[in-house]
Image: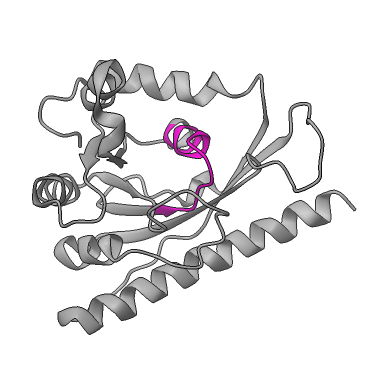
């Protein structure tokens, strides 16, 4: 399920490019792809520290997917391309009704919608989360699919790295009941944040064990 006006052929081409684009620069390892539901509405939540991780996730998914992209990227040729492959621009810091309406439409059509609940790039530890993912789950009864990523940030004090490992770990999807009212959103948002943060810690432990 893609937004109206998106071009499926361009979308599929973009997925193929994203799947291979960063492999010359990173040793990309993806685990848990079999956890991605192959049908039905899915709200994918992921951490990220750079603009690389969203592209890698987009490319590795076995289904077409739509991501909420900050409106600052919607200008010029890049914005034209992102819109044509089916990504949805959203204004941060406000209730962007047009973007949310489009997101609900995609999910009710059985699609996959990607959200980065931290809101801004940072350490990727998921210490905080915005309420958009929980709101979308409440509006559509979609399942939640957590995805953890690590490897794009250079460790403090380290020098230049040659093809560092970039790891993606897809967790198990889970159903979430979001109660009415603001308190329901707050509770559900914390549950989403906790699931994603736990998955990030699990990935950190895997990476740490691999270098011992």
Q: In terms of image quadrants, where is residue 124? A: bottom right
Q: Position of residue 137 (x, y in %)?
A: 24, 64
The colouring scheme, among rainbow, by chain, secondary structure or one colour, is: one colour
State left or right for residue 20 relative to residue 69. Answer: right
**Above or below: residue 8 compared with residue 73:** above
State left or right for residue 170 relative to residue 66. Answer: right
Which one is in front, 169 or 129?
A: 129
Q: Position of residue 108 (x, y in %)?
A: 14, 51
Which one is in front, 82 or 29?
A: 82
State left or right for residue 5 relative to residue 15. Answer: left
- The question of residue 51 being in magenta is answered with yes
Q: Position of residue 200 (x, y in %)?
A: 59, 59
Q: Could you tell me how many numbered marks the image carries? A: 0
Residue at the spot 19% in from the left edge and 50% down from the top edge: 107
Residue at the spot 48% in from the left edge and 60% down from the top edge: 172
State left or right for residue 44 relative to residue 24. Answer: left
> If the image is split into quadrants, where does the N terminus sit?
top left
Residue at the spot 22% in from the left edge and 44% down from the top edge: 90
Q: Given the current orientation, which residue lies at the most extreme right position?
A: 212
Which region of the structure is painted magenta?
Answer: 45-58
- The question of residue 78 being in magenta is answered with no
**Above or below: residue 12 compared with residue 61:** above
Q: Position of residue 143 (x, y in %)?
A: 31, 61
Residue at the spot 19% in from the left edge and 68% down from the top edge: 138
């Amino acid at each position: 399920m893609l937004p109206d006006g998106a071009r499926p052929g361009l979308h599929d081409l973009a997925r193929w490019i994203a799947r291979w684009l960063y492999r010359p620069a990173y040793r990309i390892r993806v685990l848990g792809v079999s956890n991605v539901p192959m049908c039905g509405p899915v709200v994918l939540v992921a951490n990220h520290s750079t603009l690389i991780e969203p592209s890698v996730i987009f490319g590795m998914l076995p289904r077409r997917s739509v991501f909420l992209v900050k409106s600052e990227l919607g200008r010029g040729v890049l914005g034209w391309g992102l819109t044509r492959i089916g990504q949805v621009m959203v204004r941060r810091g406000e209730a962007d009704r047009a973007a949310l309406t489009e997101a609900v439409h995609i999910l009710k059509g059985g699609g996959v919608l990607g959200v980065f609940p931290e809101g801004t790039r940072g350490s990727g530890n998921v210490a905080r989360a915005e309420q958009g993912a929980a709101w979308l789950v409440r509006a559509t009864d979609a399942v939640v699919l957590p995805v953890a990523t690590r490897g794009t940030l250079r460790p403090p004090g380290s020098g230049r790295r040659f093809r560092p490992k970039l790891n993606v770990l897809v967790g198990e999807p889970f159903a979430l009941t979001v109660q009415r009212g603001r308190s329901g959103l707050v509770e559900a948002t914390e549950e989403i944040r906790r699931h994603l943060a736990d998955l990030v810690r699990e990935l950190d432990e895997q990476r740490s064990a691999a270098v011992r």
